[in-house]
Amino acid sequence: MQARIPRRTFLAAAIGAPFMAPGLRAAEAAWPQRPIRVVMGFPGGSQTEAFARAYGEYVTQQTGQPWYLDFKPGMNGGVGAAELKRAAPDGHTLLFTITTTLIQNRVLYRSLPYDPDKDLSVVAFMPGGNLTLSVSTTRTGATNLREFVDHVRKSPKPAVGTFGPGTHPHILFHELNRQYGLDMNIVHYKGSAQMLMDLGAGIIDAGITNHLSTMPFVQKGVARAIATIPGRSPVLPGVASLADQGATSPAVRIAGYQCCLAPGGTPPEVVERISTLFQEAGRTEKMRTLLATFGADQPAYSAEESRRRYAAEMPMWLALIKELALTPE
């Protein structure tokens, strides 16, 4: 193997005999012919990275080709999408990001360096499981939503964190501001890692991100989980959902997705091949264990089902993001 693959992001794997289902068309059977570069829309330490590594390990095991990560964070995955746009549409360059790259960025930016409809092909949507609203234990003693609302009302514009503008956590904090007449200062980070560091240090009062990233801070006692989104989670059985605690916005009852994208124009056979491998990976014990840590009970959807959900849910997400009345960058 070439030593050019970045050492930090290379996924070592045992190279076995390639798995090929009978009847594959030539373009599909030929993929992959070389290492697969996976552009990452968010920094290291994110749920996106965890999913990319887990699915990639299975792809490498089944195809014999390395799968390596190339981090290009920024613009809610937009920097990575622009990088993907420049790649050959042959399935050897993919993008792992979240659906904000496909949907909310249309509203957040005046001019995108990519066309979501032409430059990106949906390979798979992967339910990310539950989000967690957590508070800094040094900033507030709140143990539930009602107590947190009381804390915010008594505080001078407390800061709360998200992993990016226009993301689901941003929408959720905006909706809590609206419903309860609050004035939280919503601070956007380029991913969850730095946001959680600031939460644990008491620099911000609260933050919303995935379970797995949050739990180490909860276990250390520097953060406290007070609500889950959209529903209750087996990871935090004693924590009620935002909806159960009285939040009424449609945003508290929906979930976002991690997603894998290919360059626009990638042959359908190649897209289906990758999608099929992801679905197979989702049936392994290792993947089921990973999903459980995020409170997710569904692995990757097929390419067809992912496209259907994309088309069906985009109007709802666009309506929610437009309510933020943000000035496009």
Image (spheres, rainbow, N blue to C red):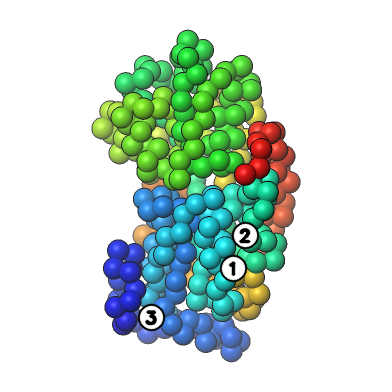
Q: Residue 242's x, y, as percent?
A: 54, 28
Residue 53 appears in the picture as rendered: yes
Q: Is residue 319 above or below residue 118?
A: above
Q: Residue furthest top?
A: 154
Residue 105's disc number: none
Could you tell me the amino acid type at mark 2? Pro
Instruction: Give the image quarter of residue 125.
Output: bottom right
- Mark 1, secondary structure of its residue: helix
Of the residues under marks 2 and 3, which one precedes in the sequence? Answer: 3
Residue at 41% x, 20% y: name it: 143
- Alpha carbon of mark 2 to alpha carbon of mark 3: how far? 34 Å
Say few, some or many: other residues with alpha carbon within 10 Å of mark 2 (under 14 / 14 to 19 / 20 or more): some
The answer to whether the residue labelled 2 contacts the one labelled 3, judged by CB atoms less than 8 Å apart, is: no
- The residue that appears at 44% across and 71% down in the rendered structure is 37
Q: In whole angstroms, how far apart are the C-alphas of marks 1 and 2?
A: 9 Å
- Label 2, secondary structure: give it: loop
Viewer-nearest of discs 3 and 1: 1
What is the number of callouts on the image? 3
Crowding at mark 1 (Cα within 10 Å: few <14, some 14-19, many 20+): many
Q: In x, y percent, where is residue 229?
A: 52, 35
Q: Identify the mark at residue 113; answer none if there is no mark.
A: 2
CA distance separating discs 3 and 1: 26 Å
> Of label 1 and label 2, which has the lower sequence position?
1
Q: Are marks 1 and 2 in contact (CB under 8 Å)?
A: yes
Compared to 230, does 75 lie above or below?
below
Residue to which mark 3 is pinned: 64
| Depth check, front residue: 31 or 157 | 157
In the figure, residue 173 lies in which quadrant? top right
Tell me the amino acid under the disc marked 1. Answer: Lys
* Residue depicted at 50% across the width and 49% down the height: 128
Residue type at mark 3? Answer: Gly
- Labelled disc at residue 85: 1
